Amino acid sequence: MATIHIDDSKPFPCFPAEPNNKRETFADFCKRQETGLNIVSDEMEQEKREQAEMQELMKKSCERKKALFYDNLDLILRHRDEIRGTPRYANIDVQYAIKGGGLYVGHLSAVRHFNFAGTLVSIGLKLSSLLEIWDNEQFKVECKCGDTAVIRSFSGSPLSGGSMATAVCPKCKKEIHVKNRSFGGYCGLMHTGHDRDIEKVVKSIIAKWTLAEVAYGKNAAEGKDAKWRKAGRELHDDGEPCNLETMINELKLKEFQLASR
């Protein structure tokens, strides 16, 4: 058997530290950052730019829809009962049609965004809820033309309770400025309507998932390929949604047909 002898009378040689192995100080890191060090990857920056572009496009779309909505406000209010009774119309998102906010509370958004298992879900104020909000005296204003205007924006303070609001008349399209109504009244009615819409959407999903599980259980009991067809395959939605543009067109056509008789 070979024997290895180690001569430890001489120290180990000093290996020079490689530049890549040198530990960087915080000061050096800051200097590199000032000269253009990328903390965020190019792909992340591209994603941010694309998201900003989509948000800008969505903003323009909401502005266009808002203008269309108030241009046809008289039509919408004439058909308010039909809209409420027609789910296709009642469930149209109109979060762009009303806005509010105030000191200490900030902007009161009429749309909420949720992240469920990585899936983004946005639930906005529904048209039926907005019409219900406008049924309250808090959101009504008598116009000089004889018609009733509705509040479409408000601001104020939760401490003083004071407020400023802007209403629009469906008949003459005049804007009316309203002062010193209860700020809490505005916020409360708007929150209640939107919360009810969120509850409605969630309960609808739960109900449809319950039906999907029942259908899956029935198929499994009958031996219908339950191994490959899970409950998710049986989940169904409400079908093609209606948008503001389609509803306005349909209501105008209906009025035209009635007038032509």
Image (cartoon, rainbow, N blue to C red):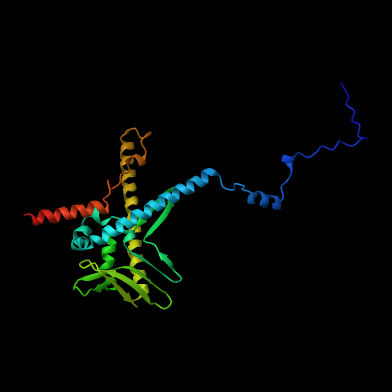
Q: Nearer the viewer, residue 142 or 118?
A: 142
The total of numbered circles placed on residues is: 0
Kindly identify the residue that appears in the image at 26 percent across and 59 percent down. Answer: 69
Q: Is 214 drawn above or below residue 77 in the view shown?
A: above
Q: Residue at x 32, y 50 (%)?
A: 207
Above or below, comparing residue 69 to residue 214 in the picture: below
Res. 116 visible in picture:
no
Q: What's the residue at 9%, 57% (across, down)?
A: 259
| x, y percent for residue 164 | 35, 74
Q: Is residue 233 left or right of residue 27?
A: left
Residue furthest left as drawn: 261
Q: Position of residue 209 (x, y in %)?
A: 34, 47
Q: Choose top left, top right, bottom left or bottom right for residue 244.
A: bottom left
Q: Is residue 5 left or right of residue 102?
A: right
- Quadrant containing the N terminus is top right
Is 159 above or below relative to 61?
Answer: below
The answer to whether residue 69 shows anywhere in this view is yes
- Residue 200: % across, % down: 32, 57
In this view, the residue farthest toward the right is 9
- In the displayed orientation, state which residue is furthest to the front: 35
Q: Quadrant of residue 192?
A: bottom left
- Identify which residue, 172 or 111, lies in the foreground: 172
Q: Position of residue 102 (x, y in %)?
A: 41, 70
Q: Quadrant of residue 8?
A: top right
Quadrant occupied by the C terminus = bottom left
Q: Residue at x 13, y 56 (%)?
A: 255
